[in-house]
C-alpha cells in the first residue's frame, strides 16, 4: 500500500509540474494583486478597525433640504463606524478646509477651522465641540485660508493658499481673540497685533502642507501646479524653515517670543550624484540636499524654487509629521501631491491620480542644524519616496492624518469623480503604512467613507489623540454652510 | 451510445467551438469595440407646465463672461478646491465656478439664462445640481415672474435622479 501511495504522489507531482510547465507561457489564472486587495478587505477589522470596507463610491447627491434635515447623511461610512454632527450651524463658513483641535488633541474643547474663501469673507472660526456654535476669530483679510496647526509653544498658525501672496499668521489665545481683520496683502499690522501677526520670515507661496516639529523647525509645501506662468515651469516645492533660536519648551505669553520671528530657509533638491548635479526632470525620488534660500523677508519662495532648481511636485497639498518616528528622535513627514485626475474621456484628461509621499530628514537634531557650505545645508539629508500611488478609484489625495494607535493614514480624496461618465463622489481612504517588506509603499488601502454630495469634498480630516474620533469637514456642500462631522466606532 | 462516446462527442464540440472563438475575425483586424457608457443627459424638453423664455444655444452653454476669480488666485489658479476651480479640467469646472459666482440674492435675466442653459444642456450632472440649488436659493428671495420655479420644474425632467431629487425638494421649499 505504501508503495502505491508513493507512486501516486510522485505521479501527481509529475502531472502538476507538467501542467505548470505547459502553462508557463499563459497568463496566470489568478491575479496576485487582486488577491492582496481581497486580503486587505477581509482583514479590515484587524488592520483598519472597521468591520468591512466600502465598495463602490456613492453616486448619490443629496438635496439641500435632505442634507439640512440630516447633515450626517452627507457621508456614508464603513460598517462599524458612526457619524455625529459636530456643527452644521448656518453661521458655519461653507468652505472649511483644515481643522485644528484646540488646545490640544488630547482634551480638545474647540475645533478651529480655516475657511477657504476670499479676503472679504470670514477666514478663521472656532467651534465649540459641545455646542457646535461657531465664532469668528479672523473676520476678513485672509484669502483662501487653508492650513492650520497648533504649535508646541502654544500658538495657532494659519496660512493662505494664495500663490506668491500667501502668508502665514500666528494667533495667540484664539479662544479670546475675535473679529480680527488682517491686511489683504503684505505684512502690515492686524487690528489686534497682540494676538494676530504675520510671519514674513517663513516666506510666501501657496501654503497648504505644514509639518511642524516641537522645536519650531517647519516643513512647508507650495500648492502649485507645473506649467504655471509658462510651459515647463516647475510645480510646487518642498521647503524647510529653521528658526534662529530653536524652541526648547513651554508656552509663549507674547507673540514676539515665537521662534518664527526669524530664521533661515532651505529648499529640497533631489539628486546627489555627481556632486549634487543629477538634478532636474527625471529625478524626483530618493536623496537630495537642502539648498539655502537667501534674500530679504518675505522671500518669494516660488521664484526661489525656480531659480535654485528645487525639485517640484504636482500640487503638493496637506502634510503631517509622523509622531512615532518623531518620538524616536527622527524626522519623517508625509504629505500628498494631488495631481490631476480629470477623466480621460475629456480632452484635458491627465489620469495623473496623485500620490502620497514621505520625506525623511535624519534625526531631529540634524534636521534642525545649520551647516552651510557652498549654498548647501549639509547638516541633514532629505530623502523622498512615494507611499501610495493614486488610481482611478482613489484620485487626487488632499488632506492627510495619521491615526494614533494604528499608524494608518486617513486620506481625503478631492478628485474629479463628478466629471466621470458615471459621476461618483469623493471618498476617504484608510491606508496602512509601509511595513517590513522590501518596498517603500503602503501595504494596502481600503475605502472607509464616501460622500453623498457630488458638489462637495471632504477636507481637514483629523484624529484626536485617542485615535477614536475623526473630525472632518464637508467642504462647499449643498447646504451652503459648513458641516463638521465626528466619525467614531474605530476598533 | 455508450458513456465514453458521449464525452468524446462533447469534447470535440467544445474544442471546435473554442477554435472558432479564438480565430474568429470581424474583418477589420481591430478588436471589437466596447460600447461606451452614455452619461445621463440633461433634460430634452420642458414639461408643459413650464412657462419660460427659451434661449437658443448650442449643445453646451457658452458663457458670456469668464468666471471671476480674485487677482491673486488668477495667478495661482488654486484659490478654491481643485474640484471647482481647476482651469485645466476643461469647461466643466469653469462652468461650475461661474454658477458659484452668480449672485444668489437676486435673479437677473443673465443669471437665469446661465442657469437655464445649465439645466438644459450641461452634460455634467454636478453642474445641473449646482444650478438647481442656486435656483432654490434665488426662489427664497422671491419669484414674482415664476421663472425660477419654472426652471425647477424643467429640472424635474432630468435624466439623472440626483438632479430630479434636488429639484423636487427645492420646489417643495419654494411652494411651502
Image: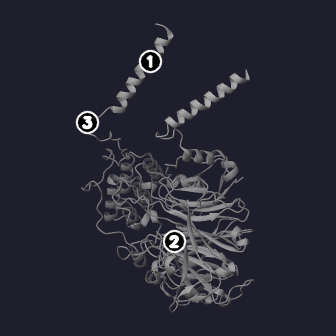
Q: Quadrant of the N terminus of chain A?
A: top right
- x%, y% of residue B21? 36, 30
Looking at the rendered image, the disc whose residue lies closer to the viewer, 1 or 3, is 1
Q: Chain of mark 3?
A: B
Which residue is painted at 53% across and 43% down in the image?
Answer: A31
Same-subunit check for callouts 3 and 2: no
Q: Nearer the viewer, residue A477 or A34?
A: A34
Q: Which mark is residue B10?
A: 1
Q: Residue A435's image quarter?
A: bottom right
Instruction: Name above or below for residue A111 compared with residue A345.
Output: below
Real-space CA distance between mark 1 and mark 3, rounded to the nearest whole angstrom: 29 Å
User: Extreme top residue here?
Assistant: B1
Q: Residue B118's image quarter?
A: bottom left
Question: What is the crowding at mark 3: few (fewer than 14 residues within 10 Å), some, or many (at least 20)?
Answer: few
Q: Chain of mark 1?
A: B
Relative placement, left or right, of A256 versus A184 is right
Real-space CA distance between mark 2 and mark 1, rounded to the nearest whole angstrom: 69 Å
Which residue is painted at 56% across and 66% down in the image?
Answer: A385
- x%, y% of residue A9? 66, 28
Relative placement, left or right, of A475 versus B49 is right
Q: Which mark is residue A116?
A: 2
Question: What is the crowding at mark 2: few (fewer than 14 residues within 10 Å), some, or many (at least 20)?
Answer: many
Q: Chain of mark 2?
A: A
Tell me, yes or no, whether the two marked residues, 1 and 3, touch with CB atoms within 8 Å. no
Q: Which mark is residue B27?
A: 3
Relative placement, left or right, of A248 versus A126 is right
Q: Residue A87's image quarter?
A: bottom right
What element does badge 2 sit on?
Answer: loop
Real-space CA distance between mark 3 and mark 2, rounded to the nearest whole angstrom: 57 Å
In primary-sequence order, the first of circles 1 and 3 is 1
Looking at the rendered image, the disc whose residue lies closer to the viewer, 2 or 1, is 1
Instruction: Name above or below for residue A100 compared with residue A68.
Output: below
Amino acid at each position: 500500500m505504501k508503495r502505491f501511495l508513493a507512486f501516486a504522489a510522485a505521479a501527481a507531482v509529475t502531472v502538476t509540474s507538467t501542467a505548470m510547465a505547459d502553462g508557463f507561457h499563459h497568463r496566470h489564472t489568478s491575479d496576485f494583486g487582486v488577491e492582496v486587495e481581497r486580503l486587505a478587505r477581509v482583514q479590515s477589522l484587524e488592520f483598519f478597525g472597521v468591520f468591512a470596507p466600502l465598495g463602490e463610491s456613492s453616486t448619490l447627491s443629496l438635496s439641500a433640504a435632505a442634507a439640512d434635515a440630516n447633515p450626517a447623511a452627507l457621508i456614508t461610512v464603513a460598517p462599524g463606524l458612526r457619524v455625529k454632527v459636530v456643527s452644521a450651524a448656518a453661521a458655519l463658513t461653507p468652505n472649511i478646509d483644515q481643522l485644528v483641535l484646540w488646545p490640544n488633541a488630547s482634551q480638545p474643547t474647540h475645533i478651529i477651522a480655516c475657511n477657504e474663501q476670499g479676503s472679504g469673507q470670514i477666514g478663521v472660526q472656532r467651534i465649540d465641540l459641545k455646542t457646535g456654535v461657531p465664532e469668528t476669530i479672523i473676520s476678513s483679510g485672509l484669502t483662501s485660508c487653508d492650513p492650520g496647526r497648533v504649535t508646541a509653544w502654544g500658538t495657532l498658525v494659519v496660512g493662505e493658499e494664495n500663490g506668491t501672496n500667501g502668508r502665514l499668521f500666528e494667533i495667540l489665545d484664539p479662544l479670546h481673540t475675535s473679529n480680527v481683520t488682517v491686511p489683504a496683502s503684505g505684512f502690515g499690522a492686524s487690528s489686534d497685533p497682540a494676538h494676530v501677526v504675520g510671519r514674513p520670515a517663513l516666506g510666501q507661496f501657496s501654503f497648504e502642507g505644514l509639518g511642524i516639529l516641537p522645536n519650531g523647525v517647519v516643513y512647508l509645501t507650495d500648492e502649485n501646479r507645473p506649467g504655471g506662468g509658462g510651459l515647463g515651469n516647475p510645480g510646487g516645492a518642498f521647503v524647510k524653515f529653521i528658526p534662529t533660536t530653536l524652541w526648547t519648551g513651554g508656552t509663549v505669553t507674547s507673540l514676539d517670543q515665537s521662534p518664527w520671528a526669524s530664521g533661515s530657509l532651505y529648499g529640497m533638491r533631489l539628486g546627489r550624484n555627481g556632486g549634487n548635479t543629477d538634478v532636474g526632470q527625471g529625478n524626483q525620488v530618493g536623496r537630495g540636499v537642502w539648498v539655502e534660500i537667501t534674500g530679504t523677508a518675505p522671500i518669494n519662495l516660488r521664484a526661489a524654487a525656480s531659480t535654485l532648481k528645487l525639485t517640484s511636485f504636482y500640487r503638493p497639498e496637506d502634510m503631517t509629521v509622523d509622531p512615532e518616528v518623531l518620538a524616536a528622535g527622527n524626522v519623517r513627514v508625509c504629505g500628498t501631491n494631488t495631481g490631476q485626475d480629470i477623466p480621460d474621456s475629456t480632452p484635458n484628461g491627465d489620469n495623473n491620480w496623485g500620490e502620497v509621499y514621505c520625506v525623511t530628514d535624519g534625526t531631529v537634531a540634524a534636521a534642525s542644524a545649520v551647516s552651510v557650505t557652498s549654498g548647501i545645508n549639509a547638516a541633514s539629508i532629505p530623502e523622498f519616496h512615494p507611499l501610495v500611488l493614486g488610481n482611478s478609484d482613489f484620485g487626487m489625495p488632499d488632506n492627510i492624518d495619521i491615526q494614533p494607535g494604528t499608524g494608518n493614514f486617513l486620506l481625503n480624496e478631492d478628485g474629479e469623480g463628478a466629471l466621470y461618465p458615471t459621476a461618483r463622489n469623493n471618498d476617504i481612504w484608510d491606508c496602512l503604512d509601509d511595513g517590513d517588506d522590501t518596498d517603500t509603499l503602503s501595504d494596502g488601502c481600503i475605502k472607509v467613507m464616501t460622500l453623498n454630495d457630488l458638489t462637495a469634498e471632504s477636507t481637514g480630516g483629523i484624529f484626536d489623540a485617542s485615535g477614536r474620533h475623526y473630525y472632518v469637514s464637508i467642504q462647499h456642500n449643498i447646504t451652503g454652510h459648513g458641516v463638521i462631522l465626528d466619525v467614531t466606532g474605530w476598533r | 451510445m455508450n458513456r465514453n462516446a458521449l464525452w468524446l462527442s462533447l469534447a470535440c464540440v467544445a474544442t471546435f467551438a473554442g477554435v472558432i472563438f479564438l480565430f474568429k475575425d470581424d474583418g477589420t483586424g481591430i478588436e471589437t469595440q466596447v460600447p461606451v457608457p452614455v452619461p445621463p443627459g440633461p433634460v430634452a424638453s420642458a414639461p408643459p407646465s413650464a412657462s419660460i423664455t427659451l434661449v437658443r444655444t448650442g449643445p453646451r452653454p457658452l458663457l458670456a463672461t469668464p468666471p471671476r476669480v480674485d487677482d491673486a488666485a488668477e495667478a495661482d489658479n488654486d484659490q478654491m478646491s481643485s474640484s471647482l476651480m481647476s482651469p485645466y479640467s476643461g469647461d466643466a469646472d469653469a462652468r461650475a465656478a461661474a454658477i458659484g459666482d452668480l449672485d444668489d440674492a437676486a435673479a437677473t435675466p443673465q443669471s437665469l439664462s446661465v442657469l437655464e442653459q445649465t439645466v438644459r444642456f450641461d452634460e455634467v450632472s454636478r453642474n445641473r445640481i449646482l444650478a438647481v440649488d442656486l435656483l432654490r436659493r434665488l426662489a427664497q428671495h422671491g419669484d414674482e415672474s415664476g421663472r425660477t420655479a419654472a426652471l425647477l420644474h424643467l429640472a424635474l425632467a432630468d435624466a439623472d435622479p440626483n438632479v430630479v431629487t434636488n429639484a423636487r425638494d427645492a420646489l417643495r421649499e419654494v411652494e411651502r
